Image: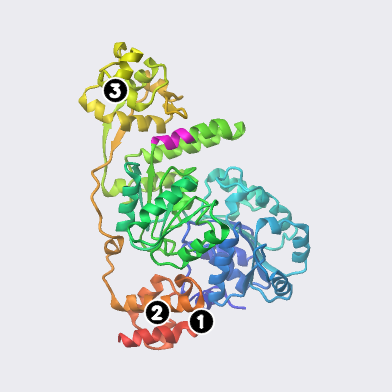
Amino acid sequence: MPTPLEALHTTFGYSEFRGRQRDVIDRVMAGRHTLAVMPTGAGKSLTYQIPALCRPGAGLVISPLIALMHDQVRSAEAAGIRAATLTSADDNREETIARFIGGDLDLLYVAPERASTDGFRRMVDRVTLSLIAIDEAHCVSEWGHDFRPDYRLLRGLVDAHPEIPRLALTATADSHTRADILAQLGIPEDGLILAGFDRPNIRYGISPRDGLPKQLAALVAETAGPGIVYAQSREATERLAATLAQSGRPTRAYHAGLDPSVRAANQRAFVGSEDMVMVATIAFGMGIDKPDVRFVAHAGLPKSIEAYYQETGRAGRDGDPAAAHLFWGAEDFSRARRRIETETPEDRRPGERQRLNALAALVEAPGCRRAILLRHFGETPPPACGNCDNCLAPPSAVDATEIARKLLSAAFRTEMRFGVTHLADVLAGRETEKIRSLGHHRLSVFGIADDAEQRLIRPVARALLARDALRADEFGGLSFGPSARPILKGEEEVPLVLPPKRERRRRDRDRQSWPDDPLFDALRARRRDLAREQGVPPYVIFHDATLREMAALRPVTLGGLGQVSGVGARKLDEYGEAFLEVLRDHA
């Protein structure tokens, strides 16, 4: 059987491993149980694909989504790996079972629901396994942001085969979640391999919502390539997709309310596109393995920093520059806090409050966004990254403690029943008909805000809602949250971040400092034609990075083309002459 390095070169066309891939693979090759926490785009799939090619037997991969499994099998088969899925959506299940039992598969992908059944376990008992890989392993932990009870049932399967190395994989796990994964899957503490959480190619940006459709349209206009916009409701998904489509950019919607055939068609179109924008609810994205997504935008607050990290991680998996931008509003925090207090089981509320407070610190931060994200996952990053909005254009900050106390006092004096517009009128001393009828013009807080303070009332209200000093009811009425008292008593200050005036950026392709290259464009066109003929996404054939290296090296023989990173033996045989034809035409 090949060595891991031989398999890497022959099958995938790479000459060396990246990051901590080799450390993970060496443990699996030695038969040791491992938890690998690796950022999206770091090549987690290679850590089980390589051992499956280099150890006797088939690799069993447990993954949570059918669409994701199908996408991974398609890419594996393109590289020459014998892979298959065994899911309810497959009509060749009997053939797949026969191949699995007969030793004709390198990898079998199944969902946790199937893997935990007695019938599947009996079948596995008849097969030699090279490893058991558990993808998205954070789903096993109640501490994680995406807990799935079916993952807990996998312990019986792995314990029935203690001699088979088990490999748990995730990109998103804080210290609590990591400890729980180790315990739930029977992996020793020394089996934890942390590859870090940094995605240096992603530029992070966060802005308060201020004309969201125009904000999103500007982001789409300046960022070339495929992108995902996450909306918070089905209605918002449809509305934003219709608005963005007016720009002429191909745009689709994706949410659970669509007919399944429409949903599937939209996903196929996006996966195969090189410039489409998908406006979707958060269910979209986990089920695809598209490496060339150039931006991910959130039209509202994500569930947690873990969810934000995972969802933004769907951008730039190929390592090329990408953008992640979050647009948030104070009402996002209000809704989230009401949901915690009314819908979340009581024993889980403290953890959910903590997650929401961590998000508040992220969106209101004057400093490096990346540093906050990395510290959340236990890392010690430098104070500035140079690739987030606050590092690229540092915001100014003012001490808004005094106007914050005035706003809180106004909410209290008006019996905590009114929204920010009415409170702003009271503080500004506007004698509106509503204020006079309620007698609020006689309150001690009437007219106590000067002109400069009046301009800060709405951003201050947004900040107080984010930090849980104010809470909004379903009608918009503002009342005190637990963080109000320290501010009123002078025990806490309220710094307010004032973002710099936004300047229109050039399209990201210009920013990447890659000059226009007719040969690269011609190679992309050839890839597009081949993908259309074979009914696969272009990236399944070659990534842009591989085409860029072809254009730089300009090989004219199969041997020379085989030296390009990402060109393995199977792809060289299948596509080599087609790309050499383009290269020779431009020689």
- SS at mark 2 in the image: helix
Q: Mark 1 falls on what kind of element?
A: helix
| Depicted 405 relative to depicted 358: above or below | above
Residue at 50% of width from left, 57% of height from top?
285
- Please report the residue visible at 56 percent of the width from the left and 77 percent of the height from the top: 80
Cα–Cα gap, marks 3 and 1: 71 Å
Instruction: Answer with left or right where residue 460 lies relative to residue 279.
Output: left
Question: Picture coordinates of residue 496 (x, y %)?
Answer: 30, 33
Residue drawn at 58 percent across, 34 percent down? 343
- Amino acid at pointer 1: Ala
**Image position, residue 377 (x, y; %):** 48, 46
Label 2: which residue?
526
Task: Give left or right: position of 439 versus 356.
Answer: left
Query: Which image quarter: residue 446?
Result: top left
Q: If you read the primary sequence from the N terminus, does the residue marked by circle 2 or circle 1 appear first?
A: 2
Q: Is residue 509 above or below residue 450?
A: below
Query: Is-magenta flag for residue 76?
Result: no
The part of the chain drawn in magenta is 330-335
Whether the residues at callouts 3 and 1 have beta carbons within 8 Å, the answer is: no
Residue at 53% across, 77% down: 11
Q: Which of the two marks, 3 or 2, is nearer to us in this view?
A: 3
Q: Few, some or many C-alpha atoms within 10 Å of disc 2 (few <14, some 14-19, many ≥20)?
A: some
Q: Say which label, 3 or 2, has the lower sequence index.
A: 3
Q: Which residue type does callout 2 highlight?
A: Arg
Instruction: Look at mark 3 in the image and give the residue it sits on.
Output: 425
